[in-house]
Each structure stands twice: as C-alpha cells, then as structure tokens.
Amino acid sequence: MSILKLIAPCKDYIWGGNRLREEYGKKLDSDKIAESWELSCHKDGQSVIDGGEFGGKTLSEFIEAKGKTAALGTNCDRFEYFPILIKLIDAKDNLSVQVHPSNDYALKVEGEYGKTEMWYIVDCDEGAELLYGFKHEISKEEFADRIKNNTLLEVANNVPVHKGDVFFIESGTLHAIGKGILIAEIQQNSNTTYRVYDYGRVGKDGKPRELHIEKAIDVTDRIPPKYPTSAQGQHEKVEGGVKTLLRTCEYFNVNKLEIDGTMTLNADDKSFKSLLFLDGTAEIKGADGSQSAKKGESFFVAANSGEFTITGKCEVILSDIVNN
C-alpha cells in the first residue's frame, strides 16, 4: 500500500510535558514526552511503518526498496537525502535559547544539513510567549558579552502567541519555544542545535546541559526577525473543506486542511505527501486500499500514488516539496 501509517519515535527532554501522551496517544516509557517525530528518516529517530507489506520497517527502508525518486518524487532529486523532519512539540517548560546553522556551515562542521523550520501553534496557554530574534540589531561583540554576562534575554525579542499562529524560523535566527505551547514543527532533516542559554538547568546526569557558544556566535544573525508572524495564510475553499497555505520555501511546502466531507488530493510524480492529523477522525482512501485516521496519527503517501481522498471531519497538516 502506498499510504503508510507511521509510528513516531518520541523524546523525553527535560522541558516536555504529557499532552502528547494524554491527548495524542503517543507512547514512551518515560514520565514525560517532549517531542514525537511524526515524519523522520533521521538517524536519531526513524519513523516506523505500522502494518501492511512493510509493517515494522523504517520509512527509510521503504524508500530504499521503492527507489528514491519513485517514492519521494522528482522535486526531491535535488536533496542528497530525505529533505524534511516533522515533529509535535509539547513545551511544558521553556526550551533553551538556541540557533540553527545554515546548510554550508552545518555540512562543513556537523556533516548534515542546517535547519530552517516552521512552527504552527497547535495550542497554547493564555499569555504564552516565544523568543524570536532580537529587539534590535546588536554587534557580534555585544552578543558574546551578553552571553558571558547572562544578559542576553534583555535584548531578545519576545512574541505573544495564539492558536493558529505561524512562525518561519530561518537558519541563523535566535529562537526559543516558551512554556505552555504545543507546536507542529516542519523543518529540514537535521538535528543540529546550538544552545546559547539554558536558564541554568541541569540534565539527567545532574550536570549543566552543554552550551555551544562559539558555534552560535559564528552562525547567529543578530537582527530582528526577518519574517512577521502570520496568523493565517492564503485560504482556498475547495470541495470538502478549506485549504490554507501556511508556508512555502525551498525546503518544504505546508498547508492546513480543514475537512468536513470528502477532499481529494493527488500524490503525483513530483512529491510525496505527509499527513499529520491534529484533530478529528477520517478515512484515507487510495487506489490500493484505505486507512482510518484520527488525532495524533501521521501518514506518508508515496509519490506516484495518484489521487486519494480524505473523508471525515478533521484538521490536517499537509506537507510536501515544491520547486521554488
């Protein structure tokens, strides 16, 4: 079957909560679940196929068996390996203040892609905020001094968030998810993060968590955010509901689908489709079978699968790759 249900690997970072377990059905033998990697071919956590011919295999193994272009589509030919990673993130506490490197820097220093990412605010506590760039431009010297003197937060740009907001976090942008925020994150396929400030917290070993000051100083754009917050993108009424463009860039293309009825989509030869169900229930039906879907579940629809339908009342994050 070309419509694959995925099992997400989960992470128990110290700042996580339990919404992913209690509301989204995620499983992990830990007292908290900070992240679920809903679409992943990364070595640090691989999506596993649930049922069917490839049941128990990783998504990477499926792609290898089918062939890269056949499974991912021609728009992915420009990428050396699987291009994106999609997560649900439950921030019970503040995440560290951090930055991601560009492709050039990361490939040279870390041996993997850099990380540009997009955040969709699935839910948040009243008054929740996140850190997004700087209030004003600062020099490299001031940046280094403020890190050393623990005054970085004085020049960091705090932004109040609301359900449905969209943030585009280009590589080099200082950022941090604040406590009380649940996010769907679509990012480049990378796990490289440089921590700048971590509120003096210690890890499971009782020692302060590692910071990456010199690398962060190398890659950080010390300016206000380049991209304004977007509460919504371009709405398009289609048969079966509403399709909203959240963000498109050279690395990923993301839409929100609000389905009430039957919506028809097409996985052509250009790109696979990733479906992350944020709410509701549905049936996904393709040429070679159907699958039930519900809140918290993710599906990979291979390129060249043709038309398929989603029938039900649900909210879905649809991600694919376009040629920009």
Image (cartoon, helix red, strand yellow):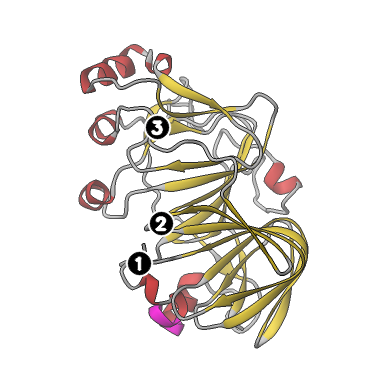
Q: Is residue 66 magenta?
A: yes
- Indicate the quadrant where residue 14 lies: top right
Q: Is residue 19 above or below residue 67?
A: above
Is residue 235 or residue 275 the one in the foreground? 235
The residue that disc 3 covers is: 225
Q: Is residue 187 visible?
A: yes
Q: Answer with mark 2 or mark 3, whichever residue precedes in sequence.
A: 2
Given this view, does label 1 or label 3 mark the residue nearer the observer? 3
Q: Main secondary structure of the magenta part?
A: helix
> What amino acid type should be assigned to the residue bearing mark 1?
Tyr
- Badge 2 marks a residue whose secondary structure is loop
- Indicate the quadrant where residue 296 lies: bottom right
Q: Is residue 141 magenta?
A: no
The residue that disc 1 covers is: 81
Q: Is residue 168 above or below residue 71?
A: above
Q: Position of residue 85 (x, y in %)?
A: 47, 57
The disc placed on residue 148 is: none
Q: Which residues are magenta?
A: 65-70
> What amino acid type should be assigned to the residue bearing mark 3?
Pro
Q: Residue at x 26, y 36 (%)?
A: 219
Q: Position of residue 126 (x, y in %)?
A: 70, 26
Quarter in which the N terminus is drawn:
bottom right
- Badge 3 marks a residue whose secondary structure is loop
Q: Residue at x 57, y 80 (%)?
A: 54
Q: Position of residue 242 (x, y in %)?
A: 68, 59
The disc placed on residue 189 is: 2
Number of residues whose C-alpha sits closer than 10 Å to that of mark 2, classed few (under 14), some (14–19) or many (20 or more): many
